[in-house]
Amino acid sequence: MTLKESFVKIGIHDLEVATSHYVLDLDTLAERHDIDPKKFSIGLGQDTFSMPAPDEDIVTMAAEAAHTLLERHDASKIRQVLFATESSIDQSKAAGVYLHELLGLPANVRSVELKQACYSGTAALQMAVNAIARNPEEQVLVITSDVARYALDSGGEPTQGAGSVAMLISADPNLIEIEPGSGLHTTDVNDFWRPNDSTTPFVDGQLSLDAYLGATTAAWDDLLARRELGLEDIHRFLHHQPFTKMARKQLAALAEHTGTELSDDLIEESMSYNRALGNTYTASLYFALTAQLHNNSDLAGKRLGFFSYGSGAVAEFFTGVVQDNYQDHIYPQHVAKQLDNRVALTYDEYRELHSDFAATSETFTTTKTTNAPFRLSGVTEHQRRYEAQ
Ligand code: HMG
């Protein structure tokens, strides 16, 4: 057997998603802020955003997504839990350790948390793929989970959101083979950051748009320098979508950069979930993937191009090939249920919920609100308490 033949296909075997209890309609925000609603629906490409109840956070959403996922699999094969987030609930203990307990995973598992703004889910995915290349019989649970919470009355307010995508990474995957060879780009830029003493980020809006476009274009160029690949080899593009219009802006920038015509048809099917969820930071790119798989029945054998971006800034462009029987392994009804079950907030309820958010380790008990299978019951002795329900 040659070295090449000995490589197994590795990638995303299965995935599941979760979002939060509440939703705010952006028309409500537009009306109360005296803004033309089309600025949000067309200008940003957003309709609604998810918002957590006080007894929800990144762990409860991730646990719900992973729990649904693992009902279909043998969890004893999982050797790592890689939890990517920028809405961390502790400066020391990994969110994945809480998740590990809630899911009842075996003790012989490595659990860590990863951070680099919206990018770290992709780092987790690539680390998982590399680990399985060494141990093809093992599996890795990759979690992306975030709450995008901007200051009230700030420019970023309409782009808030919440959600989680849990992915099982394995050899011989059912959904996507992740191909070797990425384009990478890191540059130190202060476009968006959240210091330890702030519950909301600082944002330079225009700089963030420029940084996103510059870094993703540079990642594309880096890929071209390393792989024989052209735009014509990519069937559909997927993007980190802080708001869905950003994917259109990036495709237009790529078209200009490469001197190629690129139709919005290349991205249209990837936006439906993010339009409804808002920014889900690390999970956003993987909600785009989920939407693409659910909205297009003709992807078997086709190559997808993934643009991952995290402010600060790191970008990666990588590719994956959709597997032949992917349609036997997708569950669009689960996403529909997550979106449809959300409870609509009035504007006043939204403002109150936003203002009441407490990043404290002082003792508190939450009122039971969420119907999700896991909830945050409160904090005692400075320790977060979660429960199944
Ligand atoms: P803004 O000042 O509220 O909006 O900020 P605007 O005035 O730039 O308008 C937005 C768009 O709406 C424009 O379209 C307007 O023309 C259009 P564009 O010219 O850009 O194509 N518009 C209308 N369209 C139709 N009908 C109307 C109308 N009025 C205006 N009546 C901004 C927008 C994105 C800056 C703000 O929302 C913000 O600061 N967001 C947060 C930062 C962000 O999302 N940046 C994106 C790139 S960085 C990133 O993706 C990383 C991130 O996810 C964090 C991480 O990595 O951790 C954010």
Image (cartoon, rainbow, N blue to C red):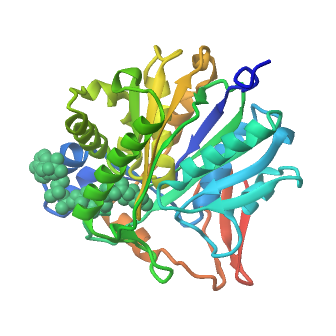
Can residue 159 be seen?
no
At x 83%, y 51%, the residue is 104
Figure quarter occupied by ligand 1: bottom left
Where's residue 327, x and y in %?
57, 18
Which image quadrant for residue 267? top left
**Which quadrant holds residue 253?**
top left
In this view, the residue in front, 232 or 64, is: 232
In the displayed structure, 62 sits above or below 175; it is below
Give the quadrant of the N terminus: top right
Picture residue at 75% right of the left edge, 20% below the top: 2
Can residue 170 be seen here? The reply is yes
Quick one: 381 or 130, which is closer to the camera? 130
Q: Is residue 316 left or right of residue 205?
A: right
**Whether residue 284 is situated above or below residue 252 in the rendered picture:** below
Residue 359, quarter of the rendered image: bottom right
Q: Residue at horizontal 68%, vertical 75%?
A: 92
Instruction: Name above or below for residue 100 compared with residue 321.
Output: below
Tell me residue 15's x, y (percent).
Answer: 62, 36
136 relative position to 162: left or right: right
Task: Pick the residue in front: 260 or 38.
Answer: 260
Q: Residue at x 72, y 57 (%)?
A: 99
Q: Percent position (x, y) of residue 382?
A: 70, 82
